[in-house]
Amino acid sequence: MPTDAPMHTRVHASEELRQVALEQFATVGFAASSLQQIADHAGYSKSSVLYHYASKEALLEAAIEPAIDAMESLVADFVAGGRSVAGRTVFIERFVDFLLGHRLAVHTFVNQGQSLRGIPVIERAIVAIRALADSMCEADAPLGERLRFGIALGGAVYTLVADATFLDEEHRTVVDAADIRAALIAVLSELLLPADGRTTR
């Protein structure tokens, strides 16, 4: 039941609302999410949401900006390190940790970014994704290499958020977080390895 409980009893209201909004944006979609739905899922009134966030766009910004900050920092470190083979290996491990820690936010701006153009935080996310692509692909990289990057990024975040929903309950198994991390590192390392270092099968 939504409530307008005093702030001292709901100290973390802003954070709770941000997290619920992030879950709604990633699973239902930004366009299909309403402030009322977010309030209901968080156990607050809509007026409480508006007390903390002036609009749905402000809530989106609060929800995904930490992930954009982290991605920009990650790319800057990789580029500053010279983008060596050893640096790429470290980068991919850090990138997987980033994806695991920010899966909902990254899913939101990667998979919904084009439909949300014009929202400042989404424009910033698109610039960050382009910087990431440019750091992973040489300037003269063929189209196939750029597609490989897009498939790696989009596929990874989709799979992490979907949580294997394409399997029925009978075939679903609980997978250890360390196993997911190791598998993601292996798959992304293969997908993001430059063409001249990739083996053909």
Image: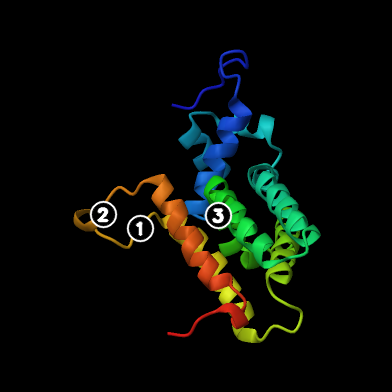
Asked which secondary structure carries label 2, the reply is loop
Q: Earlier in the sequence, mark 2 or mark 1?
A: 1
Check residue 96 in the rendering and tell me which mark sits there, or answer none.
3
Q: Would you place residue 42 above or below residue 35 in this image? A: above
Q: Where is residue 121 in the image (x, y as percent from the top left)?
A: 73, 53
Residue most extreme to the front? 86
Amino acid type, callout 3: Val
Classify 10 Å Cα crowding around label 1: few (below 14), some (14-19), many (20 and above).
Answer: some
Q: Quadrant of residue 154?
A: bottom right
Q: In this orientation, which residue lies closer to the viewer: 73 or 195?
A: 195
Judging from the image, what secondary structure is the residue with disc 3 in?
helix
Mark 2 burial class by Cα count in 10 Å: few <14, some 14-19, many 20+: few
Name the mark nearer the viewer: 3 or 1.
Answer: 3
Which residue is identified by label 2?
Answer: 172
Query: How far apart, in angstroms, are the residues tagged by discs 2 and 1?
Result: 8 Å
The residue that label 1 is drawn on is 164
Within 10 Å of disc 3 (Cα), the crowding (few <14, some 14-19, many 20+) is: many
N-terminal-most mark, 3 or 2: 3
Amino acid of disc 2: Arg
| Residue at image location 73% in from the left, 67% down from the top | 135
| Up-down relation of residue 114 to residue 47 (above or below) | below
Residue 48: percent from left, percent from top:
61, 28
> Residue 12: image x %, image y %?
60, 24
- The mark lying in front, picked from 3 and 2, is 3
Q: Can residue 119 be seen in this view?
A: no
Residue 82 is labelled as none
Circles 3 and 1 in contact, beta carbons < 8 Å? no
The answer to whether mark 2 and mark 1 are in CB contact below 8 A is yes
